[in-house]
Amino acid sequence: MPGREDVARFPEIREPLLNTVSAFGKNKRIVPEPFDVSGVTDLSGAEEMPAIPDVSEVETVRHFTRLSRLNYGIDHGMYPLGSCTMKYNPKIAEAAAASLQSIHPADRNAMSPVLKYLNLLQKYLGDICGMDAVSLWPAAGAHGELTGMMVISRALQVRGETRGKVLIPDTAHGTNPASCVIGGFGTVNVPSGEEGFLTASILKEHLDGDVAALMITNPNTLGIFEREIREIADLLHENGSYLYMDGANLNAILGVARPGDMGVDCMHVNLHKTFGTPHGGGGPGSGPVLVKKELAPYLPLPVIDEDESGLFTLEYDRPLSIGMVHSCLGNVSVCIKALAYILSLGPHALPEVAKAACLNANYLKKKLSGLFELPYDTPTLHEFVLSDKKQKDDGVTALDIAKSLVDSGFHPPTVYFPLVVHGALMIEPTETEPLQELDRFVSAMEEIAGQSTYDPGNLHNAPHTSPVARVDETAAARNLILSWP
Amino acid sequence: MSYVPHSEEDLSKILSTIGIDAPEEVFSSIPDALRFRSLLPIEGPLDEESLRREFAFTSSKTVFAGGGIYRHHIPALVDALASRQEFYTAYTPYQPEISQGTLHSIFEYQSMMAGLTGMDVSNASMYDGATSLAEAALMALRGKGIRRILVTKATQPSYRRVLGTYLTHVEEAAIEEIPFDLVTGRVDLEALQGMAGPDCAVFVQSPNYFGVIEPLEEISAIAASQAGFWGIVVTEALSLAALTPPGKFNPDVVVGEAQSFGNPPNAGGPLLGIFCTRKEHVRRMPGRIVGLTRDTSGRQAFCLTLATREQHIRREKATSNICSNQGLCALKSALYLSAMGPRGLKTAALQSAAGARCLMGLLKERGIAPRFSGPVFHEFVISMDEDKRKRLENDGIVPGIPISKAYPELPGMLLVTVTEMNTREECACLAERM
Ligand SMILES: Cc1ncc(COP(=O)(O)O)c(C=O)c1O
């Protein structure tokens, strides 16, 4: 293993903050000056200079180019971040959305074709999920969850009922309970069964007249298909409750099984996961919400409408709607990229996505489950969860394993999630990983498993080859420095 | 095309390793009744040339529309650098050791937003200005006895609608609108004085939806002393380069929209929500925040911090449910501000203001005055009938945004915006067609 001095391979890490290279007169940019500014005498801050650095163009370009080299992206290599579906982002989707850039949303003639395509995406998402109506405006998965819970809240209100709580399995992502609370509900944590999925009999124990909905992720964050979901849906419906599905893991069942057929009433999908749009280092994503017919009147405003002349417009007159959830139309260009992705694949290749995603995950699981503890041996689909139990004896943790993978040129998997597994390592390779890359990952994991017995110290200190060594997150929270002076 | 990279040989190796005969068997845990076996009614596959032909959108030639989403000059380097895959295809920087590029840039974004707004801290972004305002209201409502949210009626209508949607689900929270003066277009200070109390949070957009700059000094004197919480909403970030930084008026938060900084209108999104606050509120703030720290060998390093506010740690007790935000838009914003520099940013802001004054002057020659007498930044309201607007639109000129649906008390009114992307000739042409 290379020693600490090797970080000199990343001299970029010495890149200073922009404010420290700023000096008056460096930036020589000229901007369009079509107007005579002598008439602008009535603005309070017109004399003061804005508080931003003064750097030259070449310094800006080098600064951010150097910073980019400190990052790891999907075009580098495998990014097996469980539940995040880090698949390859086709470049053509970027090209397809490029001409959207200059369009102002108030430019109605220019917007009509955009709305036509958004409408088509809504139809396709509905077809893929077996749902009746779609709204594209939520800007991310969590925003979709919140919108969905508001839709359910409104439906209950129209039914003249007040129901206060949402059941959430213990495998759920943190956004699920957080979204329910902002949507005005309390949450109840429901344990999954021994085999890692929610059973109808466990659900029954938690059902009463105050249950508004169950919010379930299918397949769940253990990668396990919720095989009793149809019975669960029936129990909920008999109880007057709704079934909400977090569609973060739709990639596993794309074109192979439809949430609508499972009895799901309301769900969201993540275009930035399943439909190949880039994550951008933390967004913009897109979290369209999909509902069955009964809930359609409550979807957010506006609604895309086609008039007799074939012009697509936005309709705001839907008295039962929950209202607007975004100041405009959500992350429009992300939606167009997702549509380009769907059209690029077509109806035959779409189900192949799910197949290859599940095959890749099961291949890795088979190769790795001898070396690492597999807490659930229930069949899994697109992802699976290992734990650090075997390595714990040598004092090696999931975090050590994750950081060590960096030294082999991989992004680590998701760690310490789901919460039901202690020391979890959640691995999702996605369908776009070549076999050679999977094998490379297996070798890296084998080496780590071996090292944890004969040289655990080396793992505690990993990563050794990254731009920085382990970052002190505790110190960051204790001594807050959130901007330059 | 399929992006699955396997050869047939790869596939059989995978199958034999797993121990199944056919790929289909990988789905055996899905109950048969739930399998979907039909062909999806989807077009394609389309080759790249067909996709390019399919998605060819065109903007109208002349556009005077703004209203929260603006056309501004974007230096070429912004896209060139933001589209580097290292930034573009990365996930949220959970693993700081290999995400210093994103973290360092977002720290710089936070620093510049804090500097421009005159506030202590900025978060790493929100979905858009409207959800920033809604989350600011939720933050206020979690504070000491606040029950009423007062928002100026001249705040962007869609922001008020989103605020309304979010607050529907907070019991006992009421939204009240602070009226505007029908002559100046500014907030009715007397009304504000009468409404503000310790049980309320006050939110004021400036420049407001009519483009009019609010008297923040006077508003602050009332809000800071009488209200329990107060916030300034900025829907045009470029105005920060021409007006007194809102932080000077001592608000608890500055929220709004920074799409203008390096992000094109993009048919409406992605946008970039600003959320800035004072030090004492930082632990109640929503969203991700990047902090400066050290690695184990003492080197400068950045990481996401204050995670104990967030959904992945606090779950139902989190300050917000936000997870993915608008990271790349924030990066573009940092690139833009660095590329523009103080003088470039100032010039773009003053040019926009000068453009609005140029058009107002040309309209005045034709006897057309702005609807409101209050001072404006780069937008103003005039009267225009529906037919004329449609005729102009059909000739490739978008004269502005009709606002009468949101403000029935202002019939036949149009919000007109000028930026440095317009020209004198365009202004002259619009004035001529009035
Ligand atoms: C299972 C699950 N649900 C919800 C989310 C939240 O999605 P977003 O980040 O798009 O808000 C995630 C994202 O990590 C997830 O993995």
Image: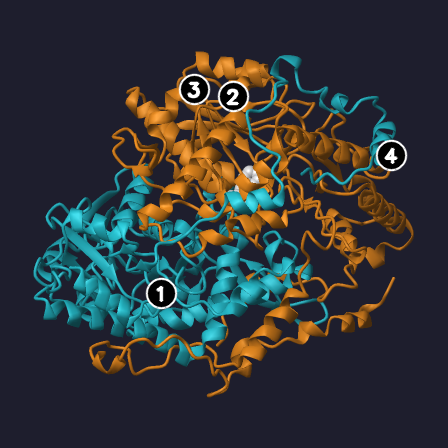
Chain colours: A orange, B cyan
**Residue A192 or A55: which is nearer the viewer?**
A55
* Amino acid type shown at disc 4: Glu
Query: At numbered mark 1, what does the secondary structure look like: helix, strand or loop?
Result: helix
Disc 2 to disc 1, how far (Cα)?
A: 43 Å
State the residue position of label 2: A260
Q: Nearer the viewer, mark 3 or mark 1?
A: 1
Q: Nearer the viewer, mark 2 or mark 4?
A: 4
Please indicate, yes or no, whether residue A358 appears anywhere in the rendered image.
yes
Q: Nearer the viewer, mark 4 or mark 3?
A: 4
Vertical arrangement, residue A425 with respect to residue B144, above or below: above
Residue A315 position within the rendered picture, expressed as x and y whole percent measured from the top left: 29, 36
Q: Nearer the viewer, mark 4 or mark 1?
A: 4
Residue A380 position within the rendered picture, expressed as x and y whole percent measured from the top left: 72, 28
Q: Is residue B409 left or right of residue A254?
A: left
Q: Quadrant of the N terminus of chain B?
A: top right
Residue B402 position within the rendered picture, expressed as x and y whole percent measured from the top left: 21, 50
